[in-house]
Amino acid sequence: MGKLFGTDGIRGEANRYPMDAGVAFSVGQAVAKIFKKPGHKTRVIIGKDTRISGYMLESSLEAGISSMGGISYLVRVLPTPGIAFIAESMRADAGIVISASHNPFQDNGVKIFSGSGFKLSDEQEEEIEDLMLNGKLPEMVPSAKDMGRSYRMEDAPGRYIVFLKNTFPRHLSMESMKIVLDTANGATYKVGPAAFTELGADVTVIHNNPDGLNINDNCGSQHTQSLEKLVVETGANIGLAFDGDGDRLIAVDEKGRTITGDQILIICAKVLKDEGRLSNDLLVSTVMSNLGLTLACKKYGFNYHASKVGDRYVLEDMQKMGAVIGGEESGHMIFLDHHTTGDGVLTAMQLVAAMIKEGKPLSELAAMMDVYPQALINVDVKSKPEISTLPQVVEAISQVETELGDQGRVLVRYSGTQNMCRVMVEGQSDDITEKCCKQIAEAVKTAIG
């Protein structure tokens, strides 16, 4: 059996290895074991999004933790960042999230947080893998009298809503704001509307009737068409779209235009800088961010750092370099002054606060950054060899880079969670970027598709 953990936990098709009941049981055992201290029962928070497979995986994790003498607290449906918050505030030893984020309902995944609210280190994940894959767990289980138990934690959503509201400045009011929320039939379907309504906003909600199968289905941060339409129809100030597990935000301005994660980062970083709260004048994003982000950082006097793709790498670099804001173009943003991980609802709170502070519509704030035309093609692949070992792909990239010169860029990388190669090209026009992107994608397809 190969490596289990990808860039964001373990992920795969539900009810198939590695996202089956047996693996989940072993994860529960391994987490209870590695966080165990002498004379102490490991305490683990377990939460999930709205996928139908979450019930099976929740029960299996709970059983694994109990069998290793640990105690589970079941918070049921709660956004990923909500589980990180509850784990830290409860002083638990760990938090486990059952979710495949923005993937379709048939996929699921397991992400693990330490008791401090941060995702596990590579070393901790390797320790869990070692216990699971090398058959070490069965001999470690305690006797029947030392087994654990589980509890339902009914007030977790309320605690998390209070936390979210406390990140919105007390001297500001949302009473003049008309907001449309798209909760992707996912984990934010209750807490998102409640948080904004309790702060006084006039809230309309769509895609908030999860049935276990409709999470992310033509809705949420990946599909903003219905949100764009409704924002214009209702005359709303802003539309806010979350993904299935609630750690991403994509916004729609009052004219019905989608605003990228990069633009949200620039808006929020500028407010922090103006208030003297942009630590080290630094903004951290990833190599996938738009060229326009780099240019906007120069324009407004921020230092800028591009990390590897993945929120864990953004966070790592933020901590190393002393940044308080960072994120990804996809809408995954971290405000370290407020939370230990990316949080879509929290980010939405900061964006609405920025609009109120600046007294400007979102369309005007979004214009702070010019978005360069970008083409992205995802190519399904059979294997993931080093790109540099594929001569025809290297040649295609070289040809495109020569054509673009210093007016664009190319990025070719494998997905950390799927058998997919992502080809991204930025350039001066849509025509050029699409042509160049197709050229490289065809070479990838021919080589390993």
Image (cartoon, rainbow, N blue to C red):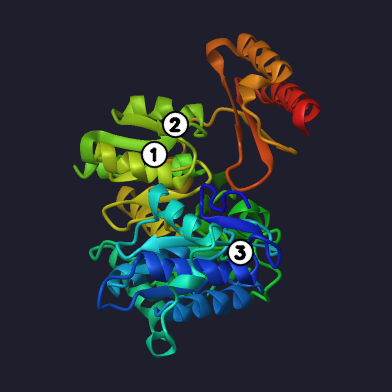
Compared to residue 301, the image places residue 35 above or below, namely: below
Residue 87's x, y, as percent? Answer: 35, 70
Q: Quadrant of residue 285?
A: top left
Residue depicted at x 21% and y 45%: 277
Residue depicted at x 60% and y 20%: 428
- The three-letter code of the residue at mark 3 reads Ala
Asked whether residue 74 appears in the rendered view, the answer is no
Secondary structure found at label 1: helix
Residue depicted at x 45% and y 51%: 126
Compared to residue 212, the image places residue 172 above or below, namely: above
Please tell me which of labels 2 and 1 falls first in the chain: 1
How dense is the environment of label 1, judged by Cα within 10 Å: few (below 14), some, or many (20 and up)?
A: many
Secondary structure found at label 2: helix
Secondary structure found at label 3: loop
Asked whether residue 154 appears in the rendered view, the answer is yes
Q: Residue 266 has which mark?
A: 1
Disc 1 from disc 3: Cα separation = 25 Å
Q: How many marks?
A: 3
Q: Are marks 3 and 2 in contact (CB under 8 Å)?
A: no
Circle 3 residue: 184
- The three-letter code of the residue at mark 2 reads Leu
Image check: 57 left or right of 393?
A: left
Q: Are marks 2 and 1 in contact (CB under 8 Å)?
A: yes
Circle 2 residue: 293
Image check: 27 left or right of 234?
A: left
| Residue 5 vs residue 104, the one in the foreground | 5
Residue 421's x, y, as percent? Answer: 67, 35
